[in-house]
Image (cartoon, rainbow, N blue to C red):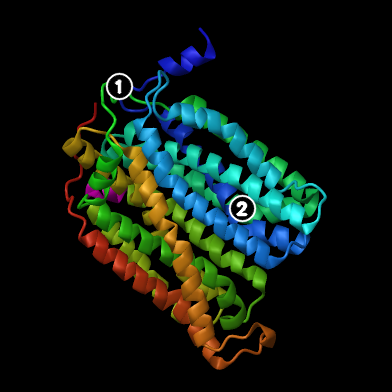
Amino acid sequence: MSLAARIRDRRLDAAPTRAQSMAFGASGFPIQLMSQTFSAFVVYFYVAHLAVPAEWVAAAMIAHGILNALLNPLVGALSDRIRTPWGRRIPWIGFGIVPLVVAFALIWMPPASSAGGLIVWFLVVVAVYDIAFVVVVLNISALFPEIFRTTAERARGNVPRQVFAIAGMILGTAGAPLLYGSIGWPGMGLALAFVCLVLFVWSFAGGMLERRGEVAAETPMKWRAQLRYTFANRAFVPYVLGSLFVQTAIAVILAAIPFYVRYSLHAAEGEGSILLGVIFVVAIPAIFLWSKVVQLTSPRASLLWAVGVFGVAVLGYLVPASVLGAALVGAAVGVGVGGLLQLLEVVLAQIIDDDAARTGHRREGVYFGVNGFVVRGSVVLQAVVAAWVLNASGFDAALGDAQPDAVDGGIRIMLAVVPMGFTALAWVCFFLYPIRARDLVAAP
């Protein structure tokens, strides 16, 4: 039997096995590894090491953000509509993995050129990376509600995925500097791309499956109906707004911690990695805790508790005068972050089940796509908040460490009070989420 035939005949008929869940979850590692490495170091690489003017790179990053946001709903809708002998999602993922990892490696391997040539390289390669990233990642996400059908299955199945994802985040932010410091930027790109390819192949071969015949007889929904049913969904609208506010709160915290370490705690800049590391390390066991909570309660109830824990914990950043004290606060924040990582997709999967029951169509792609489009707004909100707070407090980079006293208070507000405000808005949105049941469909 040919490889194409073997892929075509792979179908899921029952609950996934532990090995299939683990393999599917492994996709979280390369996704977060690439995402975190790109977001943390690409501007630094092109501006500081390649001497491309900062305003050129900033404009290119804006173009990157716009393209990424627009691609999400478009690819999601197309994925829902396309029917092939190999399924709706599998062809996208299978054809997208290699271009994705190759484009990621090429970002860090530009040819010797002028600044103009380098920015052209950046725009072209990052555009390919963006397209391949959305194609692969959105379709992997769309498989999650299809593979795992009940709240219990989703709670258990999302654990390895989020643990792999956190490991990818840590390697992407902490491991990348060690690599480019020892083997150079091209070596780092090749090494990380190879790791990503290995993990993607394992995940694709062992865990990415579609259910037999589930949507084969469906007539694809018309484009206008896609939009109408999605934005009129009484569960999705509060969910996606709550998700935007939560993502904004997290983005503000990540952006504020370097300022907090230097100007509020008066510690070495490198100690910011301690505060970030504590959050993510604690989030790993917290994922297991929240997996149990959602199985005992419901997606809505457990998400409200997780958002509440996160919101109360971030207020603790107002108090510490040392890195140790801030790390203890970070541990509490990590408990809430673990819950958010574990529960947001479980709740979105429930929305998709409810939509399928009402419309007769399973539309995982468009829901994950629109969600991805909306939460991209967190980047804009984070930038606006940071600029407003720093300017209002009198921050001046030219003063170095001799900042006005108001800067310490402003940074603490940015790190604690502002995220708490966004979290409170998120809590209200999730409180308005109307689905209170634990399961809407029975396991096949």
Say which residue appears at 27% left-offset and 60% top-offset: 304
Does residue 26 lie above or below 174 as drawn? above
Quarter assignment of residue 195 = top right
Does residue 328 lie above or below 321 as drawn? above
With 367 as the anchor, is 431 left or right in this view? left
With 403 as the anchor, is 74 left or right in this view? left
Residue 217 position in % (x across, y down): 26, 21
Verify whether residue 293 appears in magenta: yes
Whether residue 339 is visible here, answered yes or no, is: yes
Q: Tell me which amino acid carries mark 2.
A: Phe
How many other residues sit within 10 Å of disc 2, few (<14), some (14-19) or many (≥20)? some
Q: Tell me the tag on residue 15.
A: none
- Along the line of sight, which residue is nearer the eye, 196 or 218? 218
- Nearer the observer: mark 2 or 1; the answer is 1
Whether residue 192 is visible here, answered yes or no, is: no
Q: Tell me which amino acid carries mark 1.
A: Ala
Q: Which residue carries the number 2 mark?
A: 38
Q: Tell me the tag on residue 216.
A: 1
Q: How far apart are labels 2 and 1 at the CA level?
A: 38 Å
Verify whether residue 294 appears in magenta: yes
Name the main secondary structure of what is drawn in magenta. Answer: helix
Does residue 388 lie above or below 229 as drawn? below
Farthest residue toward the top? 1
- Segment colored magenta: 292-299
Q: Quadrant of the C terminus?
A: top left
Residue 266 position in % (x across, y down): 62, 81
